[in-house]
Amino acid sequence: MARVPLKHSAPERALRAALTSAGFRFRLHLPDLPGRPDIANKRRKVAIFVDGCFWHGCPRHFRLPKTRTSFWEEKIRRNRLNRARHRTGYPPEWAVVEIFECEVRERPGEVFAEVIAAFARSPV
Ligand SMILES: [Zn+2]
């Protein structure tokens, strides 16, 4: 039987667990927010994007595939462009946090603190 694919990456799930245990509530992939952030809370005006190192061209981990090179180059370039455009789609009072999956894996404490601070920033 085929393995059921994980809908969300391990770093994303770890981040959600950290927020939940800190007592924060959030929604996933809200379609009415720019870029459909992975984690968001509209009342607190916070949007979190957890980017895959491959799909979003992490400067440390992205390796261009050896086949269909120009297709992948263009694909990743567009992903990065879209991400930049989404960021500017939020009003200035929003906290928009973009992190690569590797950052969650390598320094989870720092990343969790940053994201929790973004949630806690406005007393709602
Ligand atoms: Zn990376």
Image (cartoon, helix red, strand yellow):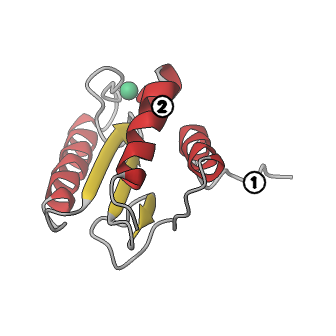
The residue at 31%/20% (across/down) is 60
Q: Residue at x 42, y 63 (%)?
A: 40
Real-space Cα separation, disc 2 to disc 1, in angstroms: 24 Å
- Where does residue 113 sit, x and y in percent of width and height? 44, 35
Closer to the N terminus: mark 2 or mark 1?
1
**Residue at horizontal 65%, vertical 47%?**
21
Instruction: Classify residue 16 as left or right of residue 44.
Output: right
Name the mark on residue 104. Answer: 2
Please tell me whether residue 39 is drawn above or below residue 117 in the rendered image.
below
Q: Quadrant of residue 62?
A: top left
Q: Residue at x 62, y 56 (%)?
A: 7
Q: In the drawing, does residue 5 fall left or right of residue 26?
A: right
107 to 40, vertically: above or below: above
Q: Quadrant of residue 66?
A: top left
Q: Nearer the viewer, mark 2 or mark 1?
A: 2
Can you tell me whether the CB of the residue at mark 1 lies under 8 Å from the nearest atom of ligand 1? Answer: no
On screen, residue 14 above or below 26? above
Q: Residue furthest bottom?
A: 32
Secondary structure of residue under mark 1: loop
Q: Residue reaching furthest right? A: 1
Q: Position of residue 51 (x, y in %)?
A: 38, 43
Q: Secondary structure at mark 2?
A: helix
Identity, as a three-letter code, of the amino acid under mark 2: Val
Location of residue 97 in the rendering, given as x and y in whole percent from the top left corner: 31, 47
Residue sitting nearer the eye, 124 or 24: 124
Q: Is the CB atom of the residue marked by disc 2 within 8 angstroms of ligand 1's nearest atom?
A: no
| Residue under pointer 1 | 4
Q: Where in the figure is residue 107, as x and y percent of width and height?
A: 47, 22
Q: How crowded is the residue under tag 2: few (<14 C-alpha within 10 Å), some, or many (20+)? A: some
Mark 1 burial class by Cα count in 10 Å: few <14, some 14-19, many 20+:
few
Q: Quadrant of the C terminus?
A: bottom left
